[in-house]
Amino acid sequence: MATPKIVLFYVFTPLSDPEAIRLWQLALASTSGLTGRIIVSPHGINATVGGDLPDVKRYVRATRQYPAFADADIKWSEGGGADFPRLSVKVRPEIVTFGDPSRVRVDADGVVGTGVHLSPTQVNALVQRRGDEVVFIDGRNAIEGQIGRFRNAVIPPAQTTRDLLDFVDGGRFDEYRDRPVITYCTGGVRCEVLSALLVERGFSEVYQIDGGIVRYGEQYGDDGLWEGSMYVFDDRMSVDFSDHAAVIGRCSRCGNATKNVANFPDAEGRDLVVVCEGCLGA
């Protein structure tokens, strides 16, 4: 029996015909029997798909044949096609919906004006060198930060990615303008834009984690600066990097420690909350 796998990747690059790329990606993924979500825009591509390992490898090889995607940083994860309800391939104005495509400038090298990319090793070295002066800013939705985050991180009360643009423009993070700021998100895609917005705002020292939480967790597991579980946008809901991951989430009903995230009050609900299994079944 084939091993199931999930891959996620993004590439910021100018695409003159996103619809053609959408049709090509739809054909590639569907003929390989993959499920998941692929977003194409004039800014590039953002994809998370799963399936049997040989099929996923075939899809990755074919995707990399397109010159602009040849160097895509492919992140592999446990899971498979069963973790997604279907295959969705869409064209949108942005591959991450900040709500103002005109604010994002993209060239062949990616987003223009981003923060400095740091490897996980460089992240730790910066914190060791600068200590509490360093500020981690979570570039995800607030609920994601409830079950996992970098130690002492700033968790904005964002309900959607659009909120982050309002927070930057509204000065919510301005107290950190003269401190070293490290933005982070799941795989790095949201921080490409968030870090550029902070640079545009006049922040003096902006960084982002190359490969996001995924790459950091792969290298350091739960023995570094990361705490808790990483939220994911599929039926798994969260993943751990080791067998000793801390449980930092708190049930919104009873307050007990939990990493469980679910639609509540029932599976048909549209509000994701942190809720323990006991309260979910009550």
Image (cartoon, rainbow, N blue to C red):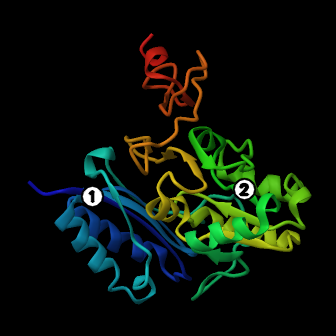
Q: Residues within 10 Å of mark 2 (few under 14, many from 20)?
A: many
Against 56, residue 21 (above or below) is: below
Q: Is residue 262 visible?
A: yes
Q: Quadrant of residue 248?
A: top right
Against 16, residue 281 (above or below) is: above
Quarter holding the C terminus?
top left
Residue at the (42%, 25%) spot, across then down: 267
Q: Earlier in the sequence, mark 1 or mark 2?
A: 1
Residue at the (43%, 84%) spot, across then down: 71
How far apart are labels 1 and 2 at the CA level?
A: 30 Å
Relative depth, front residue between 1 and 37: 1
Q: Which residue is mark 1?
A: 5
Residue 25: x percent and y percent? 34, 70
What's under tag 1, amino acid-wise?
Answer: Lys
Q: Secondary structure at mark 2?
A: strand
Q: Answer with left or right where residue 245 lies relative to residue 50.
A: right
Residue at the (62%, 44%) spot, across then down: 145
Q: Which residue is mark 2?
A: 137
